[in-house]
């Protein structure tokens, strides 16, 4: 079941919480196994080669005991020193060859593992880039993060080393059985007898083990979500002096995870303990049986060799049990990873979507109604026309739906009722790339990235020259503060724009939007944190900017929007007034009241 489906099973309130577990799938899905195979096939070059090296290493190590047997049974009784030395040399050679081949194999497996990690992470990350705002709105970001980094790391070993070792150990078992039957069929049979016992045991414990590891990954994910959120919100935490309370929550989450982890360890340990015990018992049994047979059936050398093989026979079985443990854990993580990769992309181009070669800038909303959650209508039958070059201000109380209009215009959400048209073309029918590349959107909660100031401005236009960046910054008024910084445009800022003031952040975000030279400009509260005198400067910039393009300006501060060609007053998702500043003032309606309230002083 997909992540989105699972989410629906929970109430909306529970969705977005770090203390609510994700849904657990009971069975290993065939679909996921197929995906795993896909990645293995991609890495098959290294995997196959390492398999060849593994097989050779195995054989080289398995012939060793045969030399010991000949030394003990032939060279020693006959006092044949030459044969003894020859056998010793062969034994040494077989050990060295086997170890050397094993070393090469390890490197090949590591390469394969690195390749697999890269492929899975790439697919996951590139899929995340395509997912809609609603996907990210709906869950703690920490739960997404764990899938991309720690989970992918955890599965790589299982998928490279695990797979190879699995094949090798299975082959090893057959090789050893073959060698044992060559030496003595009776003792070989005694050794193999414990096998079905173990198989039944592992089969019984399997579901419990899988569930246990899934629970660990769930609790780990909750913990991650909480830690990430706490670090993001550390300033608020300190401001409210909530450190102790948060520590308590973190403690509980860690305890919960540890409890599940201990359970999983107990179960895995039981598997390990049982295989180990059965193997030791069988090994002893081989010796006892051997002693019974010793006279006259078994030679001393044969007994020693059989003991060695019996021990080696159980080694792969124990290894298989360990590999199985790793697989079980990895499958729990893979479930989560593949879940995300399978999450449907809801905002995407329709088949045969058309390219928008050049937007002139005619924007029309035709009877658009919209709801984020399918129940509460946020926009109600909104219709308006914006002509090329026009500047339209959207004003209205908090929560009226202003940002929602912008979200639909940029197609961040699918429009289900009514139509949004640009140059008479339904935005649902054009490619998103061609649409968004001609739109400059400054979001209300703008985000800056780790890097220099110039890097952040360049985000709007990858190949912008330094001159272009300066020119854009001068237009928006950002240049004044950038110039005063010790390293100017090369000043490093951190994620979310740490290091500069809130108003400066807005100026940067504004510059970033401007440099993309969009046909349609959308500014959502672009100047809300900027002081009035700077705003006057920015105003001039905005005036220059708006020339020749269609602009939508959302602002609470009326000085910002006075000069717009049209002002729309939005209230509860409906346009209640529309016209120029003068017209609306004459109307003496909602806008008039708003102006009076703001200019009272
Ligand atoms: N992602 C979302 N999921 C669900 N509801 C949302 C979401 N975003 C906004 N809303 C709701 O939709 C309504 C309109 O929100 P919108 O962001 O468009 O308001 P706004 O007019 O831009 O307000 P503000 O002036 O505060 O920015 C609000 O009632 C809000 O609670
Ligand atoms: Mg808003």
Image: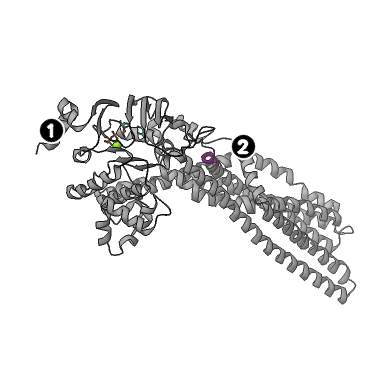
300 above or below 76?
A: above
Q: Secondary structure at mark 1?
A: helix
Asked if residue 447 can be seen in this view, the reply is no
Neighbourhood count class around disc 1 (C-alpha, 10 Å): few under 14, some 14–19, many 20 upward: few
Ligand 1 found in image quarter:
top left
- Label ID, residue 436: none
Whole-percent x and y of residue 383? 33, 25
Q: Position of residue 535 (x, y in %)?
A: 21, 47
Q: Report which residue position mark 1 lands on.
A: 596
Which residue is rendered at x = 71% and y = 65% of the image? 99
Q: Determine which quarter of the picture holds residue 182.
A: bottom right
Taking the image as shown, residue 164 lies to the left or right of residue 355, namely right
Quadrant of res 379: top left
The residue indicated by pointer 2 is 31
- The answer for how far apart the CA atoms under marks 1 and 2 are is 63 Å
Q: Can residue 283 be seen here?
A: yes
From which residue to which does the magenta span run? Answer: 338-354
Question: In the shown orientation, is residue 277 left or right of residue 499?
Answer: right
């Amino acid at each position: 079941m997909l992540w989105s489906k699972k989410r629906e099973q929970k109430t909306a309130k529970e969705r977005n919480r770090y203390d609510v577990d994700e849904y657990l799938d009971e069975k290993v899905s065939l679909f996921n196994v197929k995906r795993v195979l896909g990645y293995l096939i991609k890495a098959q070059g290294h995997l196959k080669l390492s398999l060849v090296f593994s097989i050779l290493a195995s054989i080289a190590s398995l012939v060793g005991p045969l030399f010991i047997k000949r030394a003990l049974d032939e060279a020693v009784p006959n006092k044949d020193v030459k044969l003894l030395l020859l056998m010793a040399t062969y034994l040494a050679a077989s050990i060295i060859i086997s170890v050397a081949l094993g070393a090469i194999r390890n490197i090949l497996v590591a390469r394969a593992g690195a390749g697999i990690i890269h492929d899975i992470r790439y697919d996951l990350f590139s899929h995340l880039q395509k997912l809609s705002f609603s996907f990210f709105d709906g869950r703690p970001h920490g739960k997404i993060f764990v899938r991309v980094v720690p989970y992918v790391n955890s599965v790589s070993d299982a998928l490279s080393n695990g797979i190879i070792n699995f094949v090798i150990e299975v082959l090893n078992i057959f090789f050893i059985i073959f060698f044992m039957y060559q030496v003595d069929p009776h003792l070989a049979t005694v050794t193999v007898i414990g096998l079905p016992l173990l198989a039944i045991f592992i089969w019984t414990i399997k579901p419990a083990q899988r569930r246990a590891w899934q629970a660990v990954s769930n609790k780990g994910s909750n913990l991650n979500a909480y830690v990430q959120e706490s670090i993001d919100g550390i300033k608020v935490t300190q401001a409210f002096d909530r450190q102790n309370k948060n520590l308590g929550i973190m403690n509980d989450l860690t305890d919960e995870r540890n409890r599940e982890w201990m359970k999983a360890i107990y179960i895995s340990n039981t598997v390990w303990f049982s295989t180990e015990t059965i193997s030791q018992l069988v090994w002893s049994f081989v010796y006892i049986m051997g002693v019974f047979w010793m006279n006259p059936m078994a030679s001393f050398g044969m007994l020693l060799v059989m003991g060695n093989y019996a021990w080696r026979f159980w080694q792969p079985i124990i290894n298989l049990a360990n590999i199985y443990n790793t697989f079980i854990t990895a499958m729990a993580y893979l479930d989560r990873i593949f879940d995300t990769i399978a999450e449907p992309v809801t905002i995407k181009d329709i088949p045969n979507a058309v390219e928008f070669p050049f937007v002139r800038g005619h924007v029309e909303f035709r009877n658009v109604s919209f709801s984020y959650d399918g129940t509460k209508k946020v926009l109600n039958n909104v219709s308006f026309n914006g002509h090329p070059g026009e500047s339209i201000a959207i004003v209205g109380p908090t929560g009226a739906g202003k940002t929602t209009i912008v979200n639909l215009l940029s197609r961040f959400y699918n429009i289900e009722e009514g139509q949004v048209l640009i140059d008479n073309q339904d935005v649902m029918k054009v490619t998103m790339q061609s649409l968004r590349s001609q739109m400059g959107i400054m979001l209300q909660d703008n985000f800056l990235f780790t890097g220099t100031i110039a890097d952040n401005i360049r985000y709007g236009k990858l190949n912008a020259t330094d001159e272009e960046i300066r020119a854009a910054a001068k237009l928006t008024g950002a240049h004044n503060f950038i110039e005063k910084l010790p390293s100017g445009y090369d000043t490093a800022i951190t994620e979310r724009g740490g290091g500069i003031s809130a108003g400066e952040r807005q100026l940067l975000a504004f510059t970033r939007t401007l440099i993309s030279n969009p046909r349609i400009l959308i500014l959502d509260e672009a100047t809300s944190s900027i002081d009035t005198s700077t705003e006057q400067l920015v105003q001039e910039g905005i005036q220059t900017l708006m020339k020749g393009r269609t602009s939508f300006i959302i602002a609470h501060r009326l000085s910002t929007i006075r000069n717009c060609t049209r002002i729309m007053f939005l209230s509860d998702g409906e346009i209640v007034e529309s016209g120029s500043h003068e017209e609306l003032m004459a109307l003496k309606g909602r806008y008039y009241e708003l102006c009076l309230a703001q200019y009272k002083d």
